[in-house]
Image (cartoon, rainbow, N blue to C red):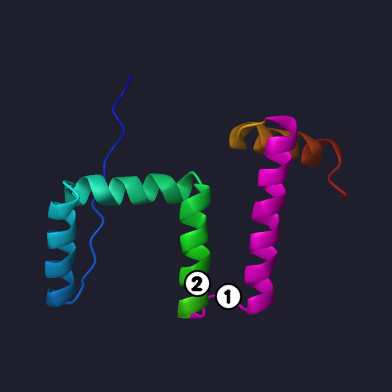
């Protein structure tokens, strides 16, 4: 099996914010890599708690309109309810929607 190619993610922050960040990481016994990999995993896995943070962040940054944010939140809750109701994992739910879309493209 071939190893997945890795890419760097680079961005800039204020020097003071970087210093506070490093202190907090040290307090929590985390490296920058562990922190950012964890954040990326939580975000891409749509971790419930992390997505609550994202919803708050989008509101603070005024990203998306209020109706769009509400629709995203409603969809997120509906997906969670469906998963609980049928005890399905995210990938299983996506597979179901893919199948339905293939069988009923007009929906």
The relative height of residue 20 versus residue 52 in the rendered view (above or below) is below
Q: Name the image quarter holding residue 95.
A: top right
- Gap in angstroms between the C-alphas marked 1 and 2: 7 Å
- The extreme top residue here reads 1
Q: Residue 48 or 92: which is nearer the viewer? A: 48
Main SS of residues in magenta: helix
* Label drawn at residue 58: 2
Provide residue 47's location: percent of width, then percent of height: 49, 47
Q: Is residue 77 left or right of residue 63?
A: right
Q: Is residue 30 magenta?
A: no
- Residue 99, image x and y in percent? 76, 34
Residue bearing the label numbered 1 = 64
- The answer to whether the residue labelled 1 contacts the one labelled 2, judged by CB atoms less than 8 Å apart, is yes
- Which segment did they paint magenta? 62-87
**Residue 81 in magenta?**
yes
User: What residue is drawn where x is 28% and y is 37%?
Assistant: 5
Q: Residues within 10 Å of mark 1 (few under 14, many from 20)?
A: few
Q: Callout 2: helix, strand or loop?
A: helix
- Label 2 neighbourhood size at 10 Å, few (<14), some (14-19), many (20+)? some
**Front residue (pair 44, 18):** 18
In this picture, is 95 found above or below 68? Answer: above
Q: Earlier in the sequence, mark 1 or mark 2?
A: 2
């Amino acid at each position: 099996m071939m190893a997945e190619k890795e890419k760097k993610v680079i961005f800039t922050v204020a020097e003071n914010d970087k210093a506070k960040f490093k202190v907090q990481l040290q307090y929590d016994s985390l490296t920058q890599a562990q922190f950012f990999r964890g954040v990326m995993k939580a975000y891409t896995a749509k971790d419930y708690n992390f997505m609550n943070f994202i919803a708050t962040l989008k509101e603070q940054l005024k990203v998306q309109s209020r109706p769009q944010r509400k629709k995203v939140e409603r969809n997120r809750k509906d997906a969670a309810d469906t998963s609980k109701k049928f005890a399905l994992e995210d990938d299983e739910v996506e597979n179901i929607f893919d199948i339905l879309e293939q069988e009923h493209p007009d929906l």
